[in-house]
Amino acid sequence: MDTILVLTVILVATSTFAPGFRRATLPHELHEFKAGQGLTVSGIDWGKAKTNVVLILAVGCQPCERSYPFYSHLAEIAKNRPNVRMSIGFFGSQSSGIQYSATLGAWASSLEVGSFRAVDEKMITVPSIAVTDSRGVIAKSWSGHFSKAAEDEVVRDLAAR
């Protein structure tokens, strides 16, 4: 009898609390950035440059970490473009993003760091790269782990600015 009572309690608790927990932690769809959409990243001042390149990362994201050599290359290109500024937007708090970016190496140390939150209860796709104007309006974006072809496209776009 005690076993049946325990199983009943577990079943009721699971069916009552688990659905709400799933909705809060696992959004139904991912948010990808689209041209023409305004980008909100706390801690980043869009007006500092005509063109902004924002790396959208998450602490501990393995696809993000595999792309660090590429991001370092982008930072080098952006540094030589007077109208282009590169920054990092971390999913989560700005302070954890700043702490984490300090571990990424010299390429990240000079970049402005901001933070994202969920957008309309959707998770932000990481890694992503968004190119915006001086108002934070997206001109072009790429999401997911970057293939060599996607990396080449990003570099061509940045070189043209």
Image: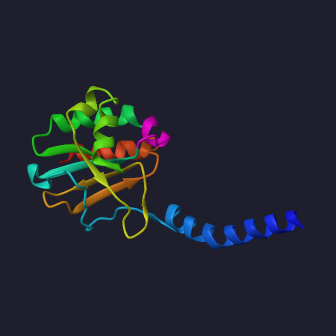
> Residue 99 sits in which quadrant?
top left
Q: Which residue lies furthest to the top in this view?
A: 106
Q: Toward the viewer: 145 or 9?
A: 9
Q: Toward the viewer: 122 or 146?
A: 122
Q: Which residue is drawn at 68% across and 68% down?
A: 13
User: Up-down: is 11 above or below 109?
Assistant: below
Q: Which is the main secondary structure of the residues drawn in magenta?
A: helix
Query: Left or right: where does residue 17 sit relative to residue 153?
Result: right
Q: Which residue lies furthest to the front in this view?
A: 2
Q: Which colour scheme is used?
A: rainbow
Which segment is the magenta one? 59-66
- Please state the total of marks drawn on the protein image: 0
Q: Does the magenta stretch include residue 124?
A: no
> Residue 118 sits in which quadrant?
bottom left
User: Up-down: is 151 above or below 124?
Assistant: above
Residue 84 place in picture, x, y as percent: 15, 45
Q: Toward the viewer: 6 or 117?
A: 6
Q: Which residue is drawn at 20% across and 47% down?
A: 160
Residue 45 place in picture, x, y as percent: 14, 52
Residue 82 place in picture, x, y as percent: 9, 40
Q: Residue at x 86, y 64 (%)?
A: 2
What quarter of the picture does the N terminus occupy? bottom right
Residue 111 place in picture, x, y as percent: 21, 38
Query: Left or right: where does residue 134 sit relative to residue 147?
Result: left
Q: Toward the viewer: 18 or 99?
A: 18
Q: Residue furthest right?
A: 1
Query: Left or right: where does residue 2 sit relative to residue 33?
Result: right
Q: Which residue is drawn at 33% across and 65% down?
A: 34
